[in-house]
Image (cartoon, rainbow, N blue to C red):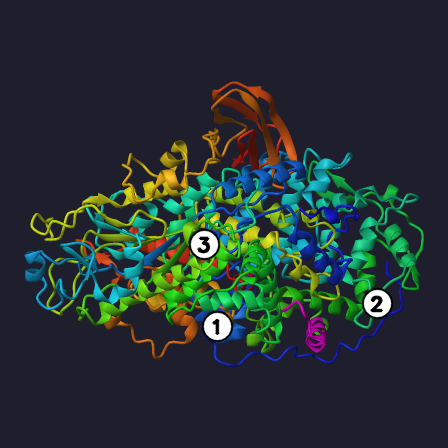
Amino acid sequence: MNSSPTIVHSLTQQHTGLPAYTGNWGKAQASHLVRRTHFGNKVSDLNRVRAFANATEAAQTLVDEAKNAVLPDAPSWFANNNSGNILDMYDIQFRWMDAMYQGGFLSKMLLFWTNHFAVSYQNMNDLPGKAPNSYASHMFKYVKLLQTDGFGDFKELVKKVSKNSAMLYYLNNYNNRAGQPNEDFARELLELFTLGTTDKNGADNYSETDVAEVARAVTGWRVNNSNLSGFFDEDRFDATSKTIFGISDNYTMDSVVDLIFDEKPEKVAWFLSKKLYTFFVSAEPEEALVQALADYCLSVNFDISAVLVNLLASEHFYKERFFGARIKSPIEIYLGFLRQFEIVPTPEIKEFIRVQMPELNEELLRPETVFGWSGYNPPDSDGTPGHFTWLNTNLLPARWSTITDMIYGYNGAGDLYNPMRIAEKVSDPRNPFTLAEDIVEHLLSLPLDQVGVREVEEDFTGDPAFAPDLSSFPEYKINLAKILLGPIPWYEWTANTDNDGNLYYEEHLAEALRQYISYIIQLPAYQLI
Amino acid sequence: MCNQHSSHKNRHGSSLEHGQAHEKDHQSWTRRSFLSTLGIGALGSGLMLGGTPVNAMARTKFLNRLASAANNRVLILIQLGGGNDGLNTVIPVENDVYFQKRPTIAITKNEAISLSDDIGLHPAMGSLSPMWSEGNMAVFNNVGYENPNRSHARSTDIWTSASDSDQMMGTGWAGRFLVEDNPDLIANPPEFPLGVRIGGSSTLFQSEFGNLGVTFGGAAQFAQFLEQGGFYNEENTPDNDFGRSLSFARKIANSSFRYLEAIQEAADNSTNLNEYPNSGLSRSLSVVARLIRGGLQTKVFLVSKGGFDTHNNQGSTEGGHANLLRDVADSVQAFYADLVSDGLNDRALTMTFSEFGRTLDENSSAGTDHGSSAPVMVFGPVNGGIYGEHADLIDLDRSGDPVYGLDYRNIYANILDNWFELESAGMSAVLDGEYEDLGFLNVATHASPNSKPFAFKLHQNYPNPFNPSTNIQFTLPASVNVRLQVFNIQGQLIQTLIDGNVPAGEQNIRFDGSNLSNGTYVYRLETPYGAASRKMTLIK
């Protein structure tokens, strides 16, 4: 069908991509990889990732596992009937939260793709002629597609998403027919999914004529609500010639995607690489690094897994200046908190998070709650906006108060949290000095001497004759210990032993730890990942 | 939600149109927006609420000013961390048992400062003599509680939460008082911190609405705070990727702190009018004096001094314990010398407390171990003197320590009642039980003719969280016009439940949230006596 002139790209030269990280594979590097590929650092994930031989093995394993992951069975509501029930939509969100909590790279990559190929359920259940009685089912299939195909061939993914029923509805392509073109999908195909408006030099990647012509090429697609699929209806298709990027042919949905990848592969590779870079590394992309990743992307023919491994195993990725360089999105705040503290998301907690998230300007699978800008990752070629827009003087205190709700079990945020088990996992809870430091190291991404801990002037409570030996302690560690201990002399921060020889802790130690955690999560540094 | 965006076409994740200017716009717009929170230091659910209607707000602010004008008194608590040896602070100088049990550390009558024929004050506290002789110092003997707990942490929690020995309370007594004192806290949070804490136990200011105390690590951090315009230094971050993000997060955190201006203003308005000794406690008190003088409306301050856990070589007339007490005395003296310069001493009541006293027996390392009751000292406009009997050193508890004579909450109760003039309904919300008037605060002299009348009570809705309906109860002392309204978290009015005359007594109103989406809502009762608000959560 595609009779455009054969373009010979200089793909013969094999790019090795970004140089791999070969330095020490330690706790700091493993933590960074877990934080960026998961939602917060869970001890078990950290230990596992740390046990790999090096960065390449770690990144390759995480990607392979995600690519080959067996998805849980579909919920019964999906198997039974088409659903237009909002509770089933929430169920999709809850199942995703469960998956985030369980761990694995798949859920983080799903966040990336739901932003890249943004679809909102709200647009489908509210508008006439869409899918009020089946939108939850369409959304389920959309999510599943991004899960099963999100680590494969990017071009194939674009094609499949373009034919996905939720996408057809969301961008109104189900209504796009010969003689009455609707440009909505065509524009986003170019602007958001493949090219971006301009290339790295600021030149336009396409013209308005191209948009109009692409819109005619993608006509004819409709949705079958009974089997939740997009299908091609020849009668609605505009079968005349279209001229796109100056080339004329009778393009279709598939061949127009081929055309984009054939005609402008470097631009697609740049666009995707930059998005991946800003999501996984830093909101301030470095052009040379993005270019190297894009070159590699081209050389592996848009194999998403290969690109991810290259990026996540690269020397560049593990530079200390990126530890804590990104501002957490709301879902990273909430699920990250749960995973750091190993608070299993009960239905009550998931509902709490679901209700609170829109107040922080994010809702899973409903991107318009971010009103005109994408907070999930910076989609814009300038990089930075998404990241900073997550915080302002309303949103930051809202983050503080809802996390402390989860610590104290207020306002339907679960139960009063018992922090002693996590204290045992990350430290020795009987030693307040190491405990104070280890908890902070577990919670924060930055080098600890950069955190900015409150300076406590007063001496340690307790008998000065038993003053602790602080000679080897940095200033921040002394302050952290004072904040943790409060009115408790350091030598009385102890565990008791029961008749069976098991350690147990007095309730006031748990409360001291809760107050300490409440302080740490309010440090500005806690907003960074 | 940011309504500034709503006019834009939804571009499903397209670029940020306004760039940096937009971001800046957000910050300044939110800085003075209605949305209020407790900001830094908030534990538990902070106060998240969008604005109440402007006219309602203006009105309650006016009422708040009236209220604070009626009572502008402050309480300063000095926490002596570690368990102060009360027997060597307020000394039974005629008691043979005391000298028998404490062979090397006891202080004789000749050495002590005489408070009465048989009671002396530790000689290191000589700087308090003028306050004592002028009647500005009250000493309460043998203060404690039933079944004393000898764990530092637990007993500190008991003293700061005002609970029984075996009772776990999640809130502090000052936190509960400040909630009662500010019934409209949720819908109309004050522009100043209700509590300021420079060291000491954070439990004191814990409330059902989060921690009401703003915390400073010390006078040095306070100075830093003024210099930086917030708790965090936006400047000293590295110029790299995480450094720029950190600087931004710090900047937002600093401007999110809603009391920044009030504290800065108070600090700018005033200086200390007296020299203070060079000690942490003194510096903390100098900050408190500056904030009071500068007009900060905060009513409760907590400062602390640690090191009282004197198990070892505590000394007698000189030594470790003497140095601790000297610092307390010198600091309190300097604090009042500062306040008296412009008459502020009449507004400031200062009380010391410690989690427990120490053992009657001197231990084998010339120190003392965790004990039971101990004296409490109160300074300021009091009826000076000694209150209660000194500890009985013969009829002791099972550990061989004195049995308390005065429940510590009795002193709190008198302060709430006579100093802060809290009405009886409020009293019962802060402290359990009935307490006698010990007479150290002279009601007749200090009572304000405009003290707040007992007015009304708005109860927590039940059930909460709710689906889809819940009951809101309130109590009125007389038949008056009231307005009961429900707002969403953005401060938009959802429904007016009552607007008109309501009879005296308890009212029960059903609120139906069937048509509302999940989330937090605020209900607010306006009465001629003032307004009150509470949060409720709808979960479908």
- Where is residue A140 drawn, in percent x and y? 63, 44
The numbered dot on residue B344 is 3
Residue B9 in magenta stretch: no
B20 or A337, nearer to the observer: B20
Tell me the residue at 80%/44% (across/down).
Answer: A172
Q: Nearer the viewer, mark 3 or mark 1?
A: 3
Tell me the residue at 65%/79% (across/down).
Answer: A16
Residue A488 visible in image = no
* SS label for mark 1: helix
Dot 2 and dot 3 residues touching (CB under 8 Å)? no
Q: Is residue B470 above or below residue B6?
A: above
- Is the same chain shared between marks 3 and 1? no
Name the residue type under label 1: Ala
Name the residue type under label 3: Leu
Residue at mark 3: chain: B
Crowding at dot 2, Cα within 10 Å, few <14 / some 14-19 / many 20+, comes out as some
Residue at mark 1: chain: A
The numbered dot on residue A28 is 1
Tell me the residue at 90%/57% (across/down).
Answer: A208
* SS label for mark 3: helix
What residue is disc 2 on?
A263
What whole-number distance in Å separates the C-alpha atoms at marks 1 and 2? 42 Å
The numbered dot on residue A62 is none
Q: Is residue B525 above or below residue A25?
A: above
* SS label for mark 2: helix
**First to last magenta residue range:** A282-297
Name the residue type under label 2: Glu
